[in-house]
Image: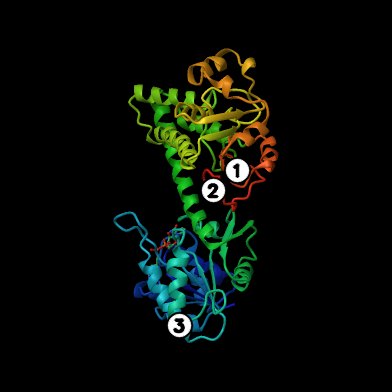
Amino acid sequence: MKLSVFGIGYVGAVTSACLARDGYPVIAVDPNADKVAMIEKGLAPIVEPGLDELIQDAVQAGRLAATDDAAFAIANSDLSFICVGTPSLLNGNLDLSYVARVCEEIGTALAAKDDFHSIVVRSTMLPGSMDATVIKLLEHYSGKKAGKGFGIAIYPEFLRESTAIKDYDFPAVVVIGRLDDITLERIRVLNSRIEAPEFVTDYATAEAIKYTNNAWHAVKIVFANEVGNVCKALNLDGHEVMRALCMDNKLNISSAYMKPGFAYGGSCLPKDLRALRYKARQLDVALPMLEAAAESNERQIARAFDMIAAQGKRRVGMLGLSFKAGTDDLRESPLLEVAERLHGKGYDLRIYDPNVHYSSLKGANLQFVRSHLPHLSSLMVPTPEIVVDHAETLVIGNGDPRFSTALEGMRPEQQVIDLVRVGALGRSAQNYHGICW
Ligand SMILES: NC(=O)c1ccc[n+]([C@@H]2O[C@H](COP(=O)([O-])OP(=O)(O)OC[C@H]3O[C@@H](n4cnc5c(N)ncnc54)[C@H](O)[C@@H]3O)[C@@H](O)[C@H]2O)c1
């Protein structure tokens, strides 16, 4: 397979060098004459450990060349990577002008080529960009149809500068947003040395995965910094605290809590986050992200209420009331909060939770219910069927396995608001509304 790489920046230079090292002939393309000249001389156009040697070896072996001629590169390759920059505009939006320009050049060159050519985007682009910009322009300028006249995929790059070659060779996961099988198979051939698991999906999802990764990394950094700041004010070593946090691979460094869904609640998280934020305020330490976490959680509760209200029906049924399945703890349950708002606004509400028996509630749990929803006993019913029969709008509040069975008796005119994504329900059903999916 002969390759071309458009854009000799951090991603393009590393991609070109690694593929040439792996034995593929690579043409690197860039309008910047200095970068082209450097590659031609066997020099790395960016500072990156190990890259000078790879480029020098590849150029000397005749496997890597550079040009500013897009048409030449397309005519002399089977697959092209797009690695051009996608910087920020002043308003924060993505600047796709370099992507648009390169698609125009590649599309024009494709019009003059008979062989099936694959285009693989490695630039980071917001979901929808493949459709609205890349494919639209490639089709327009080539006069061919994506997936038939030429191949297309997005293969987001996750390398980090300063460890880029190692990251290229040992990614944690290979994410590919695909359209046609030929291009997918060509990427697989190029990746045959890479042992990482593959995640193949549609291209808009692949675009979103890249952004979600970077947002997550930013959140991790900011979280650790906020922990450090508050620990320093307490005369503690935040590094020690975070070291212990990272030793927990069950709840902390794991996929626990990482599914989109409903608000957190219960007797610990809200209380403990509140106390930590209070302490930080006393110490004059700002914790904007942890403050925002509490606010975001409130908004998720409001979102659930708004979704129920938007159905415009008075008879509401709730399956689940405690903050998670398998407990009767109602303290700070976000579902109790939703029930309280519904009751307060005059909705005709019935609630079933197999773990919550009003007569058995005790201590702080009972106190909490009495102060928040004193009418709870009159709203609770003994079986899920009563709730389903009653409800025009049915809310699935926690992941109790009994709830998906209860839904089998659902009527077509009933609207379902799912806060937990119970397995049996189809996202595509017209009367089904997932809170954030
Ligand atoms: N830098 C990173 O660590 C990194 C990691 C993962 C993903 N990304 C993403 O990869 C993309 C590239 O990032 P980068 O840091 O390598 O960018 P960069 O700015 O270093 O390089 C982009 C290159 O594209 C060239 N270019 C512009 N128009 C062109 C055209 N029409 N034809 C050919 N080349 C053209 C530019 O001259 C430049 O050399 C971005 O979308 C970025 O978000 C970057």
Tag in front: 1 or 3 = 1
In the rendering, at what x and y percent does residue 131 appear?
47, 66
In the rendering, at what x and y percent does residue 118 appear?
54, 75
In this picture, residue 284 sits left or right of residue 384: left
Q: Quadrant of the N terminus?
A: bottom right
Q: Nearer the viewer, residue 246 or 417?
A: 417
Residue pictured at 59% horizontal, 60% vertical: 201
Residue at label 1? 421
Residue pictured at 41% horizontal, 26% vertical: 277
Could one spot residue 233 in this view of the protein?
yes
Residue at label 2? 437
Q: Is residue 361 above or below residue 315?
A: above
View extreme (left): residue: 90
Residues at discs 1 and 3 in contact (Cβ within 8 Å):
no
Residue at label 3? 109
Q: Quadrant of residue 114?
A: bottom right
